[in-house]
Image (cartoon, grey):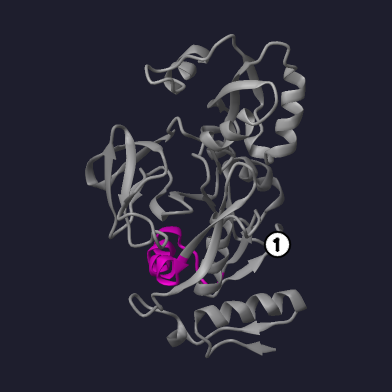
Amino acid sequence: MHDASELDLPDALICVFAAARQGAAVRVENQAARPVHGNADPAAFLLVATSGSTGRPRALARTAASWTDSFAEFSSITGITAADRVLITGPLHATMHLFAAVHALWIGACVTDDRASATVAHAVPAVLRDLLDRAPALRLAVVAGTALDAGAQERAHGIELVEYYGAAELSLVAARRVPEPLTLLAGLEAEVRDGLLFVRSPYRVLGAPEWFGVGDLAELGPNRQLVVRGRGDAAVNVGGTTVIAEDVELVLDSIDGVRASAVVGTPHSVLGATVTAVVELHDGADVDYVKAEARGRLFREAVPRRWIVVPALPRTGSGKIARARVTDSIS
């Protein structure tokens, strides 16, 4: 039996994950050892990765406080306790799932991969649909990554649902117990500028501007309510993975035969959106060759599912691709 009770948070987590790899038990039960607001080391203790559209990760540095200071409020919103068995349905390199696992360990819950015994699950809506029939003990689902759709909500009848909105760069921004509206977390401020959401948050990554946004369209309502309308035109949210349009365009434009490209999102009933590529080709270029090259250079979510070849892409007076006009022309 490993005992991590007297370790501080980073060392305790190392002990927990090492024990898990060995299949050994680990004890973490000293409540006084849990960090409280303001006591976490301000130096970065964690590097998390948000993937660029080519699959090369971009490292984001976090302090311990940027996650742990939100855990008490997250626990209050979700109702997760030390008695729960928490199922993490995705890879730990995705910040949504890593946050969920670390929070569960912090609260003293059991992190499990056994669907049959799980009482709580963290999942994107599409995964939640498939999970429900195989998780008979489930009492609560925490949903994020893409907006909770009516179909997933209906399938989850009989269990509690919590939905939250956040980003790798910002961590938690707003949360709700369904059917209540999304509400900003305590200590956060938000503004909408030209339709895009900007947040001032103590939970942002190191190096981020004081006011920061990730390109989401949003509206602010009374009583700190937030309505997220979806990604702006420079980003496509594919099943919880943010695909940056400019990154994909850089790859497409580097393929032989492509004169110019514009990448936009197309609504999808399950994934939220998929990538559409509108391309202007050189004379004699083979679009099948371009598609094959794109599949080999982009990670799965960034690969366009829809291709449209046009004689010429619309441009602004300065010669830039007029993305809004491209979107309007194919919608």
Q: Is residue 292 left or right of residue 43?
A: right
Image quadrant containing the N terminus: bottom right
Instruction: Please indicate whether residue 34 sits to the left or right of residue 127 in the image.
Output: left
Between 120 and 100, the one nearer to me in the picture: 100
Residue 282 part of the magenta-drawn span: no
The image quadrant that residue 22 belongs to is bottom right
Residue range highlighted in magenta: 62-83
Residue 307 or residue 39, whichever sits in front: 307
The answer to whether residue 271 is visible is no
Residue at x 65%, y 53% (from the top left corner): 90
Query: In this rendering, is residue 234 above or below 322?
Result: below
Whether residue 40 is situated above or below residue 240 in the rendered picture:
below
Residue 37 x, y percent position in the rendering: 34, 75
On the image, numbered disc 1 is attached to which residue?
A: 113
- On screen, residue 91 versus residue 203, left or right, reads right
Residue 233: image x %, image y %? 45, 30
Q: Residue at x 40, y 63 (%)?
A: 76
* Dominant SS type (magenta): helix
Count of marks overlaid on the render: 1
Q: Where is 86 relative to 14, above or below? A: above
Residue occupying the point 68% across, 41% down = 299
